[in-house]
Amino acid sequence: MRTPAGFECPHFYGDYHRGRDHEECRLLEASQPPQAWVASLCETCPVPGILRANACKTMHLNAEVTRSVFDLFQRRVQISAFCEKTARVVDQPEIGCGECHPLPPIFKVKE
Ligand code: SF4
């Protein structure tokens, strides 16, 4: 579903049927601990970009709402990722852990 910021996000849900106006982020709701969502969080949320870059089914995202050190009024969604197949934290969710979709050798840096 399209978020209020205009990006496709599978975690966004909006119910506008028969005059209803209910919106929620199911990722923030399901995160540990559950986080409160407001529409402005979608504007800077990295999740739509992560899911466009990496659609791995075994990677799970956990979202947390944080405040910037430089701007305490700016709340942002911060993402951590975990791969259930390799049982390890994924440092770069856009790329993945490398187990299922290894980078071709041309992209590897020689040491
Ligand atoms: S906050 Fe992020 S994950 Fe939640 S609905 Fe908005 S774009 Fe999707």
Image (tube, helix red, strand yellow):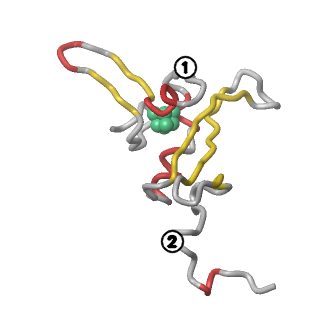
In the picture, residue 7 is in which quadrant? Answer: top left
Q: CA distance from mark 1 to mark 2?
A: 34 Å
Residue density around tag 1, few if under 14, some if 14–19, many if 20 or more, within 10 Å: few
What amino acid is found at the position of numbered circle 1 in the picture? Answer: Ala
Query: Which residue lies under the disc numbered 2?
Result: 101
Question: Which tag, 1 or 2, sits closer to the chain's start?
Answer: 1
In the picture, residue 71 is in which quadrant? Answer: top right
**Residue drawn at (40%, 33%), measured in percent from left and top?**
12
Query: Which residue lies under the disc numbered 1?
Result: 36
Per the image, label 1 sits on a secondary structure element best described as loop
| Mark 1 close to ligand 1, CB under 8 Å | no
* Residue furthest top in the image: 19
Say if 54 sits above or below 34 in the image: below
Say if 33 sits above or below 93 in the image: above
What amino acid is found at the position of numbered circle 2 in the picture? Answer: His
Residue density around tag 2, few if under 14, some if 14–19, many if 20 or more, within 10 Å: few
**Residue drawn at (54%, 35%), measured in percent from left and top?**
43
Q: Quadrant of the C terminus?
A: bottom right
Q: Nearer the viewer, residue 28 or 40?
A: 28
- Circle 1 or circle 2, nearest the eye: 2
Per the image, label 2 sits on a secondary structure element best described as loop
**Residue drawn at (47%, 52%), measured in percent from left and top?**
51
Q: Position of residue 27 (x, y in %)?
A: 48, 33
**Residue drawn at (72%, 27%), measured in percent from left and top?**
67
